[in-house]
Image (cartoon, helix red, strand yellow):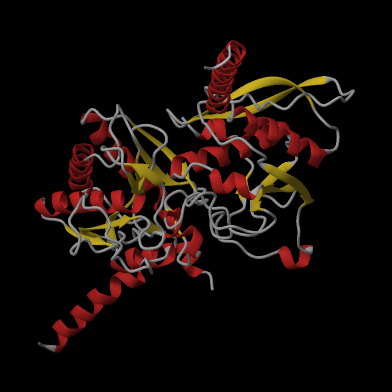
Amino acid sequence: MTPLARHLALFGLLLPAAQDPQQTPTPPPAPRSTLNHALVFLDPAHGGDDAGAPLLSPAGEPIFEKDITLALAGRLRSQLSALGLTVLSTRDTEAQAAGAPSTGAISPSAPTPDQRAGQANHVHPFACIVLHATGTGSGVHLITSALPLPHSSDAVPTLLAWDAAQAGFLQQSDRLAAEISTAIARAGLPVHTSRATIRPLDSLTCPAVLLELAPTRGLSPADSGYQARVAQSVATALLFWRGHADPPAADPAAAAQP
Amino acid sequence: MIPRHQHYLFWALAAGILLALAFLLHGCRQAEKRLATPQDETPISAPISAENETVTLDLASDSDGAITRQDRPLAMPVEASTRARALLEHLLVQYTLPGSAHPLPSGPAVDDVFLLALPLQEPAQASIPRKSSAISMRNSPVYGDSGQLAVVNLHGAFADNHPSGVEVEALTLDSIIGTLHANLPQITQIRFVVDGHPRETLAGHADLTRTYPAVDTAATRP
């Protein structure tokens, strides 16, 4: 390269920096997606010593919430895997067939809510689904965090409190709940959405929805057909949501603070 | 040969035994019916001279997850914490009545309600910088440093026998929060303890370690 060409190249590099930033404002860089768009996080609630709510099976036998959530997670995992998505679950279903009653062989030390949130936050899934079951109410309950929205609607501070980490993802979680609600309603099942303060929902840094199965039209949450319909609806909604999940933008003001 | 009067005595005794058996069976059936029938355990009105006033109850419904407001005439105590306790007792008794949309087991539910003036800390110590309203939500007054913090002390049996589930537990808490907010506007925050001690959850799901803002829960639910 000749000296003249070298000077021209250097001038070309320095020119943008010398320009008045007020005349040509530099647009802020687009937020880089930190969500893994191939990974879904499932949390079948309870487990081990924590049996959860007592319910009745379709045959009228007692069954615990932890067994129903595990069975539902197994069905959902199968549906999502068939759609090409990777699934990470807080409780391993490999050793236990979906729908099978608990044999008591599960470790008594099931993960705590904080451990469950830690697992999810470590892998950045594009959707976190927390699974519960109950004997009261009716239909499918879709619940998002009751945390208050941050002051700036589109920004989250760089430093988050553990118990309020979900605050920055509230809008995403509401949209995800709406997608799942629509899919479940299309399947002809009653569904309603609400907000609640539940652990580990408030500590998740991903679009997160808590799904609670309740009895409906004579169907028990332990009913395999009922679970299959719900799992298929949720899987369809997640496949659509995969292309729409974006992380919230970082708050530059908060980042500048010490 | 048995004398005639002994015949009469025998048959009289046999008839008496049969009558006694029939009476016992009837009594057993009556007792079973009485135990199986849901009891209306509405407390009898206390003999106080206070006049009825209109209070607002935020009543929950399990079927649609909604909370609806209803006005009821009720004689209320004057002192604020006693008033809050009477209000919550009256609210939770509604859920034990037959046909309730949010059925809860009967029995004592609220031991006490304590009202504490905010802020709890010294002003110099309370001035913690906050980046967002969500960050410092837990265990400290963050929804405003004015007003009162209501500490609701629930009865242990109430929490132990409460139906287990995310929605049903959240509805109970929202019903209590909304009712306190509607009738005692000076309350800005609410905490829950059980038998005087902190407890992780109400019945395995709803978080009781948080400080809840006193808000209109009927408006925030569908």
Q: Does A17 appear above or below A202?
A: below
Residue B118 visible within the image? yes
Q: Where is residue B95 in the image (x, y as percent from the top left)?
A: 58, 30
Q: Position of residue A112 (x, y in %)?
A: 42, 65
Q: Does B221 appear above or below A78?
A: above
The C terminus of chain A sits in image quarter: bottom right
Q: In which quarter of the image is residue A7?
A: bottom left
Q: Does A203 appear above or below B55?
A: below
Residue B147 visible within the image? no
Question: Looking at the image, which residue is at 69% across and 42% down?
Answer: B110
Total tally of numbered discs in the picture:
0
Q: Quadrant of residue A166?
A: bottom left
Apparent side of residue A84 relative to residue B138 in the rendered image (left or right): left
Question: Looking at the image, which residue is at 23% across and 37% down?
Answer: A226
Apparent side of residue B175 relative to residue A163 in the rendered image (left or right): right
Apparent side of residue A134 relative to residue A163 in the rendered image (left or right): left
Question: Looking at the image, which residue is at 74% across and 68% down?
Answer: B125
Work out whether residue A47 or residue A182 is closer to the camera in this orientation and state it: A47
Q: Does B178 appear above or below A118?
A: above
- Residue, far front: B1
The N terminus of chain A sits in image quarter: bottom left
